[in-house]
Amino acid sequence: MKSQEKVFSRKSAPERSARMVETIYGCKWSLTVYQLLANGINRPGEMVRSVEGLSTKVLNECLRKNIQFGILERQTFNEIPPRVEYHVTEFGGKFLRIIDALEALQDEIDDDE
């Protein structure tokens, strides 16, 4: 009997996107930042004032990670005093749909328990 030729190779997780999801979920404030942005709160000072327990240092680190991944963009205005706003990029919108799908999946799991 002839053995079947192997057609498939071992599948591994997509390296960059898996790391991105892991990093975002690892940052306990990223999901809160997305919620703030969805509600029109896009300035860092207002974000810190809107969320109990969120410090400027932690927020800046979270925002920096999201910018590096291309999920958020930073817009600086040439004004005095300086003004900075953050917005979700086109890629970020796609990424947030994945996050929403993961949350829906978790809700379904929770309902089954």
Image (tube, helix red, strand yellow):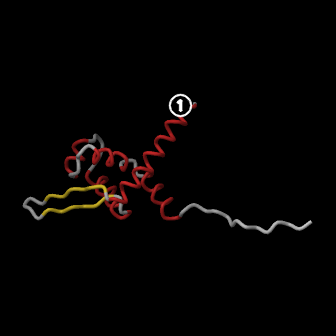
> Would you place residue 34 above or below residue 90 in this image?
above
Q: Is residue 4 left or right of residue 72?
A: right
The image quadrant that residue 50 belongs to is top left
Q: Nearer the viewer, residue 6 or 42?
A: 6
> Mark 1 — residue?
111
Q: Residues within 10 Å of mark 1 (few under 14, many from 20)?
A: few
Residue type, numbered disc 1:
Asp
Kindly identify the residue that appears in the image at 21 percent across and 43 percent down. Answer: 49
Q: Nearer the viewer, residue 82 or 88?
A: 88
- Where does the image place residue 59, in percent across and percent down from the top left? 29, 53
The image quadrant that residue 109 belongs to is top right
Kindly identify the residue that appears in the image at 64 percent across and 62 percent down. Answer: 11
- Where does the image place residue 74, in percent across and percent down from the top left? 25, 61
> Would you place residue 107 above or below residue 59 in this image?
above
The C terminus, quarter of image: top right
> Would you place residue 107 above or below residue 25 in this image?
above
Q: Is residue 3 left or right of residue 113?
A: right
Q: Nearer the viewer, residue 20 or 27?
A: 20
Kindly identify the residue that appears in the image at 37 percent across and 60 percent down. Answer: 91
For the view shown, which residue lies furthest in the left direction? 80
Total numbered labels: 1
The image quadrant that residue 82 belongs to is bottom left
The N terminus, quarter of image: bottom right
- Where does the image place residue 54, in percent across and percent down from the top left? 29, 46
- Where does the image place residue 15, in percent across and percent down from the top left? 53, 64
> Would you place residue 85 above or below residue 41 in this image?
below
Q: Secondary structure at mark 1?
A: helix
